[in-house]
Every structure is written in C-alpha cells, then in structure tokens.
Image: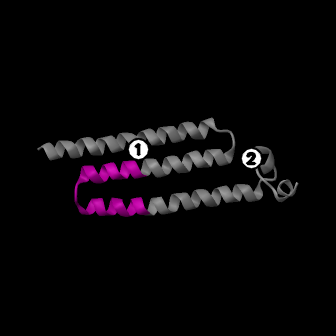
Amino acid sequence: MVFEWIRFIAGTGLLVIGVAAFLLEILGVFKFRYVLNRMHAAAMGDTLGIGAVLAGLMILFGFRFVTFKLALVLVFLWCASPVSSHLISRLECTINEDLEKSCEIETKKKRQE
C-alpha cells in the first residue's frame, strides 16, 4: 500500500513538473521578440516537458507493455525535437538578411579588424 502511494506521488509530481515546463515554454515563446530566442525556449520546454510528463505516466502505469510504448515515444521525441528545432533555426539563419541586426554575430570582417 505504501509503495502505491509513493508511486502515485512521484508520478503526479513529474506530471506537474512537465505541465509547469510547458507553461514556462509558452511564456518564453510570447515574451521573446526574436525568432531564435523563441525557438530556444520552445525546444528546451518541449524536451523537459515531454520527458517529465511521459516519465510520470510511465511511473503511474507501472511495469506494463504501455510503459514500453511510452518509453519508445520518449526516445523518439527526445531525438526528433532537438533536430527539428536545429533545422528550423538554421533555416532562419540562412534566409534572414538582417540577422546581424538581431543577433551579436562575429563575422570574418569583424575578426580581421
């Protein structure tokens, strides 16, 4: 009986941490003005939020086949989310002509001076 309560408290705690990470992510996306800052807030919030929520669900479900499926989803999302965020931010750096105005970028000309 005590083990069930510990499992419930740990799983619920991780779910609350995950939802809090998602809420902070939303706040960061609306607070920052530049797109790369928004991408960073969204990527970090997704990684932490998804990890905490899915870990909480795995603890609450116990050792079943559903837990194995949740672990596979977690591994896939932890691999796919940073890669997609990196590709989108690289696209922004490639096509944005006014990038030097928005960011502090050290170009080759500035290094030579």
Q: Which residue is mark 1?
A: 18
Q: Is residue 38 above or below residue 88?
A: above
Q: Which residues are magenta?
A: 51-75
Of pointers 1 and 2, the one earlier in the residue sequence = 1
Residue depth check, mark 1 versus mark 2: number of the one nearer the observer: 2
Q: Could you tell me what secondary structure mostly forms the magenta stretch? A: helix
Q: Nearer the viewer, residue 101 or 110?
A: 110
Q: Is residue 58 left or right of residue 48?
A: left
Task: Give residue 4's position: percent from left, percent from top.
Answer: 17, 46
What kind of residue is marked 1? Answer: Gly
Quadrant, the C terminus:
bottom right
Q: Residue visible at 50% across and 46% down?
A: 45
Q: Residue visible at 27% across and 44% down?
A: 10
Q: Is residue 113 magenta?
A: no
Q: Residue visible at 80% across and 49% down?
A: 100
Q: Nearer the viewer, residue 110 or 11?
A: 110
Judge the density around disc 2: few (<14), some (14-19), many (≥20) Cα neighbours within 10 Å: few
Q: Residue visible at 49% across and 49% down?
A: 46
Q: Which residue is mark 2?
A: 103
Quick one: SS at disc 2? loop
Task: Give residue 83's position: percent from left, percent from top.
Answer: 56, 62
Q: Is residue 105 left or right of residue 39?
A: right
Task: Give residue 75's position: percent from left, percent from top.
Answer: 42, 62
Task: Give residue 94's position: percent from left, percent from top.
Answer: 75, 59
